């Protein structure tokens, strides 16, 4: 099984179009140690021929163009794509907007939690996909094969998180209307060996249930949005903490590095990294701290091979 990181940034990408934070300003100027990143998504294949996407970022068109494996097949058909399925981990704009780039009468299947499917159904703009795109509910805690992807298994599990920003209900109390299934993580399983990777691009907290899901993974690709919970406030970018946005931070006593320190897992990779995160900068103390703890920072085009 091959996992290609199509995009490794959080919503907004890196640099973000309107952002003058230190990272965004420096990457625009070509300062060393910083590499641009598109918004998070994966392509996964067991055989290198048919591919599943995990999330459809607003940068999907550019990501497909940068990935020769996702080029149309040259078998004489006028319209052909090796992408047969898209699995969604939430209804966040940075995870679903790319579906709009997949219009053009190409049959494929969207697999998502019923909560996310209802959010898509409520936005008539996704009707542009037409009847050739099937929308299939994901069973939770049960392995299924994504359409057209023989040799791959997916198992979804609920993750502590927050409903998509545009669906927040301020009147619904501290949870803002969040319900089970609004944010899921995925076990992506190589059917031949049974070995698996876990993909959790959004996570508000690590609890015992999540630790059990991640245990034994050959690779964990995890929410690396922020380094510090208050970093966006400290940089004058936003009034929101990571907690308010539904994202655990890397550092701190209740951060992800500490929470996952004892986990039995292979590669540990942060992805969905926000442009404000100082760990994006190679050689920074924050990057060195994360790497010393055994973590990698994903970059666009990164490959994780599991056999
Ligand atoms: Zn996101
Ligand atoms: Zn920025």
Image (spheres, rainbow, N blue to C red):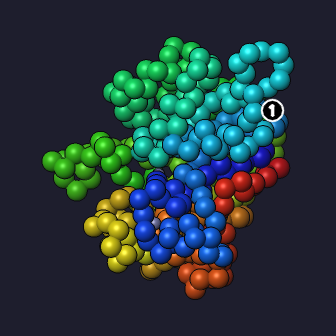
What crowding class fits label 1: few (fewer than 14 Cα within 10 Å), some (14-19), or many (20 or more)?
few
Q: Quadrant of residue 27?
A: bottom right
Camera-side residue: 193 or 162?
162
> Residue at 38% across / 58% down in the picture?
246
Q: Decide if residue 117 is on the left or right side of residue 299.
A: left
Q: Decide if residue 297 is on the left or right side of residue 169.
A: right
Residue 285 image offset from top left, x and y in percent = 58, 86
User: How many tags in the picture?
Assistant: 1
Residue farthest left in this picture: 171
Quadrant of image for the N terminus: top right
Residue 174 vertical placement versus 118 (above, below): below
Residue 199 image offset from top left, x and y in percent = 59, 52
Visible in this render: residue 254? no
Camera-side residue: 263 or 256?
256
Q: Quadrant of residue 303?
A: bottom right
Residue 306 image offset from top left, x and y in percent = 79, 51
Q: Quadrant of residue 213?
A: bottom right
Reading the image, the residue beneath label 1 is 49
> Residue at 41% across / 55% down in the picture?
160
- Helix, strand or loop at mark 1: loop
């Amino acid at each position: 099984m091959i996992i290609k990181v199509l995009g490794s940034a959080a919503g907004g990408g890196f640099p973000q179009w309107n952002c003058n934070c230190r990272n965004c300003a420096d990457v625009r100027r070509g300062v060393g140690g910083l590499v641009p990143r598109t918004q998070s998504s994966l392509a996964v294949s067991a055989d290198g021929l048919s591919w599943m996407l995990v999330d459809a970022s607003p940068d999907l068109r550019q990501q497909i163009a940068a990935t020769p494996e996702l080029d149309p097949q040259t078998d004489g058909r006028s319209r052909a794509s090796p992408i047969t399925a898209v699995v969604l981990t939430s209804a966040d704009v940075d995870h679903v907007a790319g579906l709009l780039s997949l219009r053009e009468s190409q049959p494929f299947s969207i697999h998502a939690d019923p909560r996310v499917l209802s959010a898509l159904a409520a936005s008539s703009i996704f009707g542009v996909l037409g009847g050739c795109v099937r929308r299939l509910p994901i069973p939770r805690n049960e392995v299924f094969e994504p359409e057209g992807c023989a040799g791959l298994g997916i198992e979804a599990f609920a993750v502590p998180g927050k409903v998509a920003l545009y669906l927040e209900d301020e009147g619904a109390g501290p949870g803002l209307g969040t319900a089970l299934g609004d944010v899921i993580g995925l076990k992506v399983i190589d059917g031949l060996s049974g070995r698996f990777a876990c993909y959790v691009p959004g996570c508000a907290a690590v609890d015992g249930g999540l630790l059990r899901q991640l245990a034994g993974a050959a690779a964990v690709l995890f929410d690396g949005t922020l380094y510090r919970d208050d970093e966006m406030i400290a940089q004058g970018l936003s009034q929101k903490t990571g907690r308010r946005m539904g994202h655990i931070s890397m550092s701190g006593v209740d951060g992800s590095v500490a929470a996952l320190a004892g986990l039995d897992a292979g590669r540990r990779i942060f992805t969905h990294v926000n442009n404000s995160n100082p760990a994006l900068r190679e050689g920074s103390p924050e990057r060195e701290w994360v790497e010393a703890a055994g973590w990698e920072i994903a970059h666009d085009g990164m490959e994780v091979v599991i056999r």
